[in-house]
Each structure stands twice: as C-alpha cells, then as structure tokens.
Image (cartoon, grey):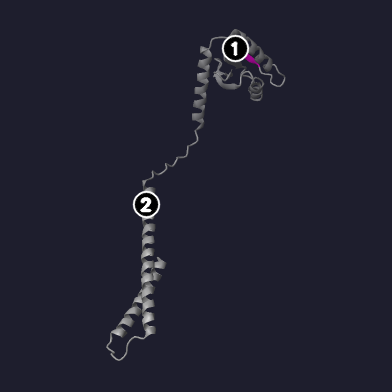
Amino acid sequence: MQKVSIILAALGLALGAGIVVHERNSKPSPAKALSLRERDELSEMKKDVGALRGELRATVAQTQLVDRAMQRVNSVREAEPSQAVEEPVEPSSPEEDRARSEAAVMRIAQSFQAEVADRQWSSKVEAEIRAALKDDLIKLNAKSVECRSETCRLELDGNEPGAQIKGLPMIANRLGATLPSTMGHEESDGRGGTHMVLYLYRDGS
C-alpha cells in the first residue's frame, strides 16, 4: 500500500506539471512558440506519466490478487472443524481403585472355579509352590495350595502380615517363569479374622 501511495503522489505531481505546462502554452502568445527543448521535455513528461500509470495498474492488480488469496485462506480456516479439546482425566478415588481390584479378583476366582483340573500340570506346580514357600528367604505358611489347569489358589496364614509383606513379592518373582501373573486379596476366615488369598496364573487365564 505504501508503494501505491508513492506512485499516486508521483502521478499527481506529473499530471500537475503537465497541466501547468498546458496552461502556459494555452495562453495566447502569438509571438512566441514552444522551443525544441520545451517540446522534448513535454514529450518525456508524457512518457513518464504513461509509465507511472502502467506501474500503478500493475501494483493495484497485484494488491487485488493478494486480497483474494487472503480471503480464500480465511474461508478455508473457517470451514475447518475445530479440534476438540480433550478434557483432563480426573484421578480415580481409592474407593474406585478398590472396587476395580475386587472385580478383577472376582473374575479370576470365577475362572479358577470353572477350570478343569490338569492333574499332571497341577501336581507339578503345587510341588513347586510348596518348595518356594519353604525357602529361607520367603518362609510363608500356606493353609492350602490348589492348582487346576491355568491357575493356582493359595490361602496364607492370616497371622503373618509382616512376613507376607516381605514374602509375597519374592514368591511372585520365584514362580514368575511358571505363573507370571499374580493377584491377591483378603478374605474373611469365618472366625472374625481375615487371611490372604493369592491367585497365580498363566498368561492364558
């Protein structure tokens, strides 16, 4: 736009100069005609005015092209659907975590009850579990150990909370090659107390 203003100003000056010359020459002076130098200057001035007009037209046309291009860009932006802003996920409460954990244990318990016993596999894995429980670094007492075809269920003595805190990660690591997944929860023992029930299972469960 600054360039257009400059061209317009120059064009105005040139046109003004042309008008002055024309007015001077339009006055009656029968005794004086235009000299050769003045005619050359007038001819050059007309050429300059024509060049300025051509440049002005080209600049205006270019400005119009830019304006149309910007209009198309803006119309495309307005047509694009705005991206949905994902709302932050609120952390779950301890009650919700507990409910999910209990539901997962319930599914494993139901799956264990529905399993058909594989005597060969179950006897081998039960022996492996009992040997791990007797390890000097673990030393956990199990009230019962039962394996089916994919899952094993352990009932641990409820009077050993300290030993269980230390021993459960170790037994899970010890049996990880055979039973890589572990899940446990507390159940009532029917006498007003609780005991730990541990499910260990293969990935196919």
The residues bearing labels 1 and 2 have C-alpha atoms spaced at a distance of 73 Å
Residue farthest along the top direction in this orientation: 119
Instruction: Specify start and end residues of the magenta stretch as a single range.
Output: 141-145
The residue labelled by disc 1 is: 146
**Residue drawn 36% across the image and 59% down it:** 64
**Residue 107 falls left or right of residue 62:** right
Please state the horizontal and vertical placement of residue 172, each as a whole percent of the image. Answer: 63, 22
Residue type beneath disc 2: Arg
Quadrant of the snapshot with the C terminus? top right
Q: Is residue 143 magenta?
A: yes
119, above or below 195, in the image: above
Q: Is residue 36 magenta?
A: no
Closest to the observer: 96 or 21? 21
**Residue 183 falls left or right of residue 43:** right
192, above or below 41, in the image: above
The residue labelled by disc 2 is: 72
Residue type beneath disc 1: Glu
Main SS class of the magenta portion in the image:
strand
* Element on which disc 2 rests: helix
Quadrant of the snapshot with the N terminus? bottom left
